[in-house]
Amino acid sequence: MKLANLDGRATVVTDAGGVDVAAASGGRFGPDVQALYDDWDTFSAFAADLGIAGAVPIDEAKLGSPAPAPRQVFAIGLNYRAHAEESGMELPTIPATFTKFPACLTGPFADVELSGSTVDWEVELVAVIGARADRVAQADGWAHIAGLTIGQDLSDRTVQFAAGSQFSLGKSYRGFGPMGPWLVTADSVGDPDDLALGCAIDGEKMQAARTSDLIFSVPRLVAELSAVLPLLPGDVIFTGTPSGVGVMRQPPRFLQPGETLESWIEGIGTIRNRLVEGPGT
């Protein structure tokens, strides 16, 4: 099942187009996509039997984040073995966790304003929580995931490294968390623990990897994070980025106004964001 945020309305994506959830359910479910995560099992059962009546073409320009207003956003640093190697750092024994503030989240095809001259790309698999997780065992981790989507953990490296090694501010400028194009349930992506992902700038490939290189898998992250605090329905986990980021290149390479950043994950789709000048560029 694919769930989209189409022009601010929860929409199930079918081969025939998008089916408006509120209309198809006769008001049983409202138009707010974020609210569906609070009753995810009931909604999933409804969506499983949903037909294509009322399906309309999907205009990608009208797609928003499939989790636009989470209560908590977790982001994981240094979570791919190859990325740890390119960074010259030892593999972590617990997830290096920070947050992207929710107001930075944006849609999968939105323009993103650059905060300065050292903004970097980080393609990531993003997991959205579908059932409250509190002290959950790793073996039960996937049962608490509503689905998966694509994210970019865009990062102002100057602010990130100047702020006392506290990453969150430099990763939370307006638009620095594009997500989408929709949420895909784990049973619809093949092997959810081994998905190809990557990104390109104006067609030039920058990152290419598989999620099997993750140090902490999605269910392991659910276990590790929920051991510390409850994960709430609709919460978002940016699971980390593979090797190939700009700051590690020789010489370093950063995003420029006018460029287009395209990111993809196998079984989910593609997002595309044009970079535009901001006050600091």
Image (tube, helix red, strand yellow):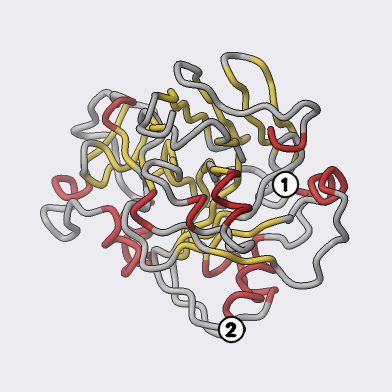
Query: Which label sits in the foreground, 2 or 1?
Result: 2
Across and down, in percent, residue 84 comes to: 82, 51
**Residue drawn at the location 84% of the way across and 45% of the way down:** 82
Instruction: Find out whether the residues at labels 2 and 1 contact each other: C-beta distance under 8 Å.
Output: no
- The amino acid on which the numbered mark 2 sits, given as a three-letter code, is Val
Q: Which mark is residue 153?
A: none
Q: Amino acid at mark 1?
A: Thr
Left or right of 37? Residue 240 is right
How far apart marks 2 and 1 lie (CA) works out to: 24 Å
Which residue is disc 2 drawn over?
228
Q: Is residue 61 above or below residue 239?
A: above
Give coordinates of residue 40: x percent, y percent.
37, 64
> Which of the two residues, 207 or 149, is positioned nearer the viewer here?
207
Against 39, residue 24 (above or below) is above
At label 2, counting other C-alpha atoms closer than 10 Å, the crowd grade (few under 14, some 14-19, many 20 or more) is: few
Give the side of residue 65 with respect to residue 272, left or right.
Answer: left
Residue at 36% x, 60% y: name it.
Answer: 45
Q: Quadrant of residue 44?
A: bottom left
Q: Nearer the viewer, residue 122 or 160?
A: 160
Identify the image quadrant of the C terminus. Answer: top left
The x, y position of residue 100, in whole percent, is: 47, 57
Secondary element at image label 1:
helix
- Secondary element at image label 2: loop
- Marks counted in the figure total 2
Name the residue: 33% across, 54% down: 103
Picture residue at 67% right of the left edge, 57% below the top: 77
How many residues crowd around disc 1 within 10 Å: few (fewer than 14), some, or many (20 or more)? Answer: many
Of residues 274 and 22, the one drawn nearer to the viewer in this rendering: 274
The image position of residue 88, as x and y in percent, is 87, 50
Residue that carries the numbered disc 1 in the rendered image: 211
